[in-house]
Image: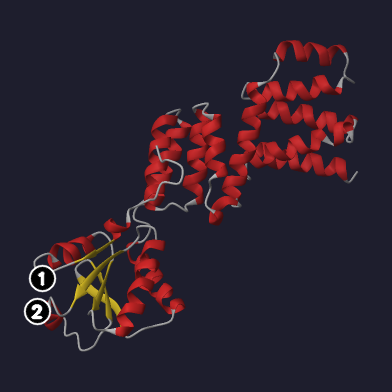
Amino acid sequence: MLGLGEKPQAKAELIKDTTEATFMADVIETSQTIPVIVDFWATWCGPCKTLGPMLEAAVTAAGGKVKMVKVDVDQNQRIAAQLRIQSIPTVYAFWQGQPVDGFQGAVPASELKAFVDRVSALAGDGGLADAIQAAEDMLTEGAAADAAETFAAILEEEPENAVAYAGLVRANLALSNLDQAEALLSAAPPSVAKSKELDAARAQLELAKQAANAGPEAELRAAVDKDPADHQARFDLAAALLAAGNPQGAVDELLELFRRDREWNGGAAKTQLFTIFEALKPQDPIVLAGRRRLSSMIFA
């Protein structure tokens, strides 16, 4: 499983120096499956010393969607001649064995990023969408451990994929690894930490914590039947229903509690309803109907 703070790919795997003997494997063959950016440079070239590190940083930031190969033109004159390199720095992008993009000279960081983004997009998502769907299917079918491994593998390729990151959290919740799920949420990259997918995962974690402490459903139902005004019992019954996999029943009880006393315990019923709505999918019929019923009570 993906460790916290683990890098998706080592820099050495993304960026390498090549020679005339290895150029075919490093560039032509590799570019059949992943775009390869080739930086033609020399030790005496001043602009190369500026462009090279900037290009390496942009390639590293792309998270494995593109690789970079460096060619010292003084040491590999045959390659430079075959590709008609007239001046340096020169940068070519190879995709499926062919040069498809490139530029000469130093360029601003914004143009460099745009170039790397453009090249990265050549291979599409690399099948990540299919992998994510497969992991979601595993989770739905109860194969949470397999789903966790798949989501972790996706994150190795794209560490800032919010859907996969939230999926890994949800898989850990399904495995009752609440501490690991919470640790993953705390360590989420800033770029995805506030995404709707991770907001939903946080809500699911909160509900999972509550479920671990839920009381016996039968006793709580009896308490509510005996005294419908026992708001705490009704609130606890909603938690027990959630723990039993009955979100519709939980929403019904919380809506009834809100109807009876919307200000009870600092508006706890409304807060809990929003947590449930956040945890479920936005188009879930329970969410759509629950939001409508809650709105009608609020604005009645």
Q: Are marks 2 and 1 in contact (CB under 8 Å)?
A: yes
Quarter where residue 209 is shown: top right
Colour treatment of the image: secondary structure
Residue 94 shown left or right of residue 222 in the figure: left
Q: Quadrant of the C terminus?
A: top right
Name the residue at the bottom extreme: 86
Of mark 2 and mark 1, the one earlier in the sequence is 1
Q: Position of residue 51 (x, y in %)?
A: 35, 78
Q: Position of residue 296 (x, y in %)?
A: 84, 43
Q: Position of residue 75 (x, y in %)?
A: 13, 76
Label 2 to label 1: alpha-carbon separation: 7 Å
Q: From this view, report whether residue 146 is shown above or below residue 224.
A: below
Quarter where residue 245 is shown: top right
* Residue 281 visible within the image: no
Q: State the SS at label 2.
A: helix
Identify the residue at image location x=38%, y=73%. Answer: 54
Name the residue at the front extreme: 44
Q: Position of residue 57 (x, y in %)?
A: 39, 67
What crowding class fits label 2: few (fewer than 14 Cα within 10 Å), some (14-19), or many (20 or more)? few
Quarter where residue 153 is shown: top left
Identify the residue at image location x=45%, y=28%. Answer: 142
What crowding class fits label 1: few (fewer than 14 Cα within 10 Å), some (14-19), or many (20 or more)? few
* Residue receiving disc 1: 20
User: How many numbered circles does the render carry?
Assistant: 2
* Residue 107 visible within the image: yes
Residue 265 shown left or right of residue 207 in the figure: right
In this orientation, which residue lies closer to the viewer: 84 or 73?
73
* Residue receiving disc 2: 78
Amino acid type, callout 1: Glu
In this orientation, which residue lies closer to the viewer: 177 or 164?
177
Amino acid type, callout 2: Arg
Q: Quadrant of the N terminus?
A: top left
